[in-house]
Image (spheres, grey):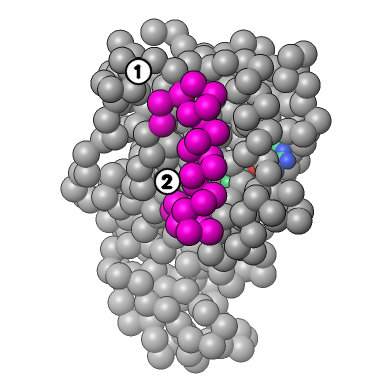
Amino acid sequence: MNLKCASFFAGVGGIDKGFEKAGFETIYANEMDKNASITYKANYKNVHLDVCDIRDLNEKKDIPAFDIMLAGFPCQAFSVAGYRQGFDDEKGRGNLFFELVRIIKAKKPKILFLENVKNLVSHDDGKTFAIISNTLEDLGYHVKPMVLNASSYGNIPQTRERIYIVCFKSVTQYRKFDFPKPIKLEMTLKSVIDFDTEQDQRYYYTEKCSFYNELRDSMKSSDTCYQWRRVYVRENKSNLCPTLTANMGTGGHNVPLILTHDDRIRKLTPRECFNLQGFPDDFILPETLCNGALYKQAGNSVVVSVIERIANEIKKAIE
Ligand SMILES: C[S@@+](CC[C@H](N)C(=O)[O-])C[C@H]1O[C@@H](n2cnc3c(N)ncnc32)[C@H](O)[C@@H]1O
């Protein structure tokens, strides 16, 4: 097989990890966030990482030849939680898709693997997605999109619905490719979150917290993740963590909460958030980074096992 991947908007390399587990190799990556790049470099010592704005990349000189483009392009402009401005986002974030187009035109990869938030499909009555899809088809790709929830497709107890867009130059490969089938959720919150071991005191909520009483009144179950929503406590379905988001990195209160075995309230640690994204235990979280940066990186990333399953299907289609 020996197909080489290049990863754009690489973050900490969650997509790269899924492809690596399926037997693909990433040779090049681009990411502009300094902190995410520190985590990326710590884990992918052999990948050439350009730490810069994708808009500053010279597609001919800076990027080596590659076969598969990996890109979880920024979703703010497409997200319900974001500005709902799509391609017109005045900060230009929506337009970053066209940076990928520029690179695709120059490098002509055989396969594209794109990931985004679920509501990319419904944004602007479907016009945004139609533009993306038509643009990729005009570039000569056969486009297959599907929304998958990590809890049904990745055996991970997190609700995380994402759209995956897999595109092939070859129509034969496109016809052979199917997204993976749902699988039973066997992993429990207890297999990724340590309810029993004492953690650093900074993770615990005590009477000093202004909404401690509200948390106490609402948090009764120990197989559940809770969230503080400014004025109320949200209880999620048992054995499912809500979608981890990048804003876990700001303010601290957005990190999901649990009731520990000794009836204390604490937030998840950064490692537990990476576990909930299906990262392996040996994935390095650099000690030089503050927790805020690590929470943000986990929330921005992907569920590795879902990516791995899709990458395995791609492998079957090209073999
Ligand atoms: C949704 S995250 C992707 C995370 C990645 N899939 C992972 O597994 O960690 C989008 C990433 O794009 C990066 N980014 C945003 N704008 C960028 C730009 N103009 N050039 C390069 N990277 C950019 C952000 O720093 C962020 O890490």
Q: Amino acid at mark 1?
A: Val
In the image, residue 188 sits, relative to residue 280, either above or below, namely: below
> In the image shown, does 232 or 198 lie closer to the viewer?
232
Q: Residue at x 45, y 82 (%)?
A: 233
**Count of all numbered marks drawn on residues in the image:** 2
User: Horizontal and vertical percent for residue 90?
Assistant: 76, 56
- Residue 104 figure quarter: top right
User: Horizontal and vertical percent for residue 129?
Assistant: 49, 46
Q: Pointer 2: what residue?
A: 163
Q: Please tell me the numbered disc located at residue 171.
A: 1
Q: Residues within 10 Å of mark 1 (few under 14, many from 20)?
A: some
Q: Is residue 176 visible?
A: yes
Q: CA distance from mark 2 to mark 1?
A: 21 Å
Q: Please tell me the numbered disc located at residue 57.
A: none
Which stretch appears magenta? 118-143
Q: Considering the whole magenta stretch, tell me its main secondary structure.
A: helix
Q: Residue at x 61, y 46 (%)?
A: 74
User: Between disc 2 and disc 1, whose residue precedes?
Assistant: 2
* Front: mark 2 or 1: 1
Q: Is residue 44 visible?
A: no
Task: Point out the image quarter for the N terminus.
Answer: top left
